[in-house]
Image (cartoon, rainbow, N blue to C red):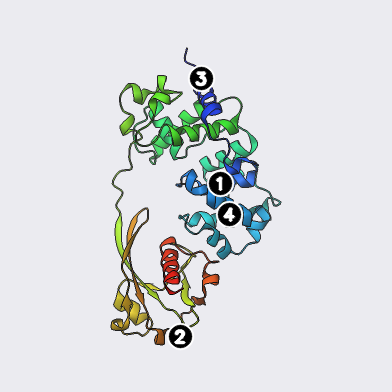
Amino acid sequence: MVERFADRILAWWDRHGRHDLPWQHPRSPYRVWVSEIMLQQTQVATVIPYFERFVRRFPDLAALADAPLDDVLAHWSGLGYYARARNLHRAARACMAQHGGTVPASAAELEALPGIGASTANAIISQAHDRPLAILDGNVRRVLARHAAVEGWPGQRAVHDRLWAEAESRLPAARGADYTQAIMDLGATLCTRSRPACEACPVSRDCVALARQQVDRLPSPRPGLKVREKNLFVLIQQRDDGAVLLVQRPPAGIWGGLWSLPEADSLEALADRFGLDARSLSTLPSFGHRLTHRKLTIHPACCPPDAATGIQDSRGRWCKREQWQALGIPSPVLRLLECLSEFQG
């Protein structure tokens, strides 16, 4: 008889797993929640410095709820998928107003908060309260799709439901927090997307995909994701005192709620927006930036110094370096501002 799936994973994790992640010490509901939101579509190594900086500034639920959204976005800047930060902030305020200033201890109440689905809710509860609950983050989906040879893209409802049932059927009776971390670690370190280390995997002996030589093609990829290309022309306007004009983006859409440089779809439209002659703008080298569904080519242009002072924008503000460093700014725009500042300083 094959040893239980969960027992083998826990035994492997006890020896080889990650035991010193910052959200594990202490493993409080708030810290686990913040980490789980950051870890959505982002790797652990990337998240760790952001998490540490975030919880230093917002050490508890009350601090996060009381903070201005701009401050929250500034501490998220560079991590991407900014809707996560906006939802985290909204959810913190909802917890203060509706849950007595605490993170709910039930998955159903967590799911009612912005930005938290069933898998994230279970991940928070299982780790913060040591309850065995099913989760389906990207790493776990990959482990289960291979171990049970589940065909089809996991984003499809029928495939998702099958994987959820597989996750529930493998839960241990105890050590919920450790098991949740263990199966995530297994997917992140051994059962990787490419070149999985099947020879070191604790559950390889009954992995159906391995037996059928299907590991390389499971889980099935998302069908036909179309990536759109977009040209973005941005205007750098700088006053004599070094202040740059930034505008706040609408709350929805790309970089929602962040501060960025004024933009348009063409150099001429950018000039027309501020009553400038396009021929007076000096252009900088263009560069690319990839989003999930979009490939941006960013074309920076500089406003003549004598024209910048009189420019106004109803959604804008003039910011010196120490001011824009405290705002949430998209990472490619932040790099552009940093390079400009270094060149001039």
Circle 4 residue: 53
Residue 334 place in picture, x, y as percent: 45, 65
Query: Does 203 appear above or below 110?
Result: above
Numbered disc 3: secondary structure:
loop
Measure the alpha-carbon separation of dots 2 and 1.
Answer: 43 Å
Q: Judge left or right: residue 150 versus residue 134.
A: left
The disc, 2 or 4, on the residue closer to the chain's N-terminal end is 4
Q: Kindly identify the amino acid type of the residue bearing the numbered disc 3.
A: Arg
Front-most of residues 88 and 190: 190
28 sits left or right of 234 in the view: right
Q: Which residue occupies the extreme top position in the image?
A: 1
| 130 vs 338: above or below | above
Along the polypeptide, which appears first: circle 4 or circle 1?
A: 1
Q: Residue at the spot x=41%, y=23% of the render?
A: 204
Q: What is the number of the mark on residue 309?
A: 2
Q: Earlier in the sequence, mark 3 or mark 2?
A: 3
Tell me the number on the disc at residue 4: 3
Position of residue 131 measured from the top left corner of the image (x, y, whole percent):
61, 33
Task: Judge depth for marks 2 and 1 and give the one in front.
Answer: 2
Of pointers 2 and 1, the one earlier in the residue sequence: 1
